[in-house]
Amino acid sequence: MPTRDDAWELVREWTESDSLRKHMLAVEAALRAYARRLDADEETWAIAGLVHDLDYERYPDLETGHPRHGVEELRRLGYPEEVVHAVLGHADFMGVPRESLLDKTLFACDELAGFIAACAYVRPEGIAGMKTKSVKKKLKQPSFASGVSREDVYRGAEELEPETGLDFDQHVQFVIDALAPHADELGLAGKEAG
């Protein structure tokens, strides 16, 4: 199985955008934290988080592109089918049911991690001290981070709750807490930290 280092090299080869790389690193951090909580294979989950948007920059068209080309490349390189299935399942429009815990966790963390990052960008202190309440307040503002699917954020948490026992508020805080230790790497440290 390819290693996390292999996955990161693949991401760097396919993705030039710093913000997209940081998003994939954020989802990796969230999945790693959930894998520890749920006693799952941390490396497999981390890799799934890291490569989930592998082809988004090259093939952004959802009708013919992302995640089809990335999945093809992952299969060619021998990534486990568990990772491939999770990548397919995170894209609702692919029609691949989210069956495994990894499938559900990737979907539940993807849009939410992006939204939490957007919230951190507008706070002088970044992600430090962020609470669910401030994220929920921003979720109610349609113009804020309008590219983030609120429906996916809520549905992801709902699908994951029976597996984790975490309600929506707890899930949001869990992801915040998973990203916070990586604030510098993810660009979420805020202006006060510098």
Image: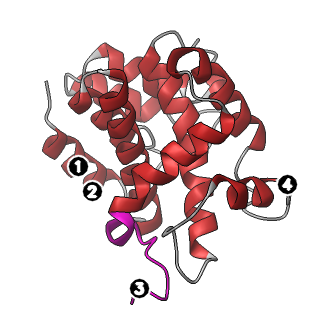
Drawn side of residue 41 relative to residue 189, left or right: left
Q: Using residue 131 as the reference point, say whether residue 163 is left or right of it.
A: left
Which comes sooner in the sequence, label 4 or label 2? Answer: 2
* Residue name at image x 57 percent, y 84 percent: 124
Mark toward the viewer: 4 or 2: 4
**How many angstroms separate mark 2 from mark 1 (CA)?**
6 Å
Mark sitting earlier along the chain (4/1): 1
Amino acid, disc 2: Arg
Residue 86 at x, y = what percent? 44, 23
Residue range in magenta is 182-194
Q: Does the magenta portion include 188?
A: yes
Q: Position of residue 150 (x, y in %)?
A: 76, 43
Name which residue type carries label 1.
Answer: Trp
Point 26% across, 54% down: residue: 13
Residue 5 sits above or below residue 81 on the image = below
Residue 8 % position (x, y):
23, 49
Amino acid under disc 4: Lys
What residue sits right under mark 1 in the picture? 8
Q: Nearer the viewer, mark 2 or mark 1?
A: 1
Q: Which residue is mark 3?
A: 193
Helix, strand or loop at label 1? It is helix
Q: CA distance from mark 4 to mark 2?
A: 34 Å
- Give me the disc on residue 12: 2
In the picture, the quarter occupied by the C terminus is bottom left
For numbered disc 4, what is the local secondary structure?
loop
Name the residue tied to disc 4.
140
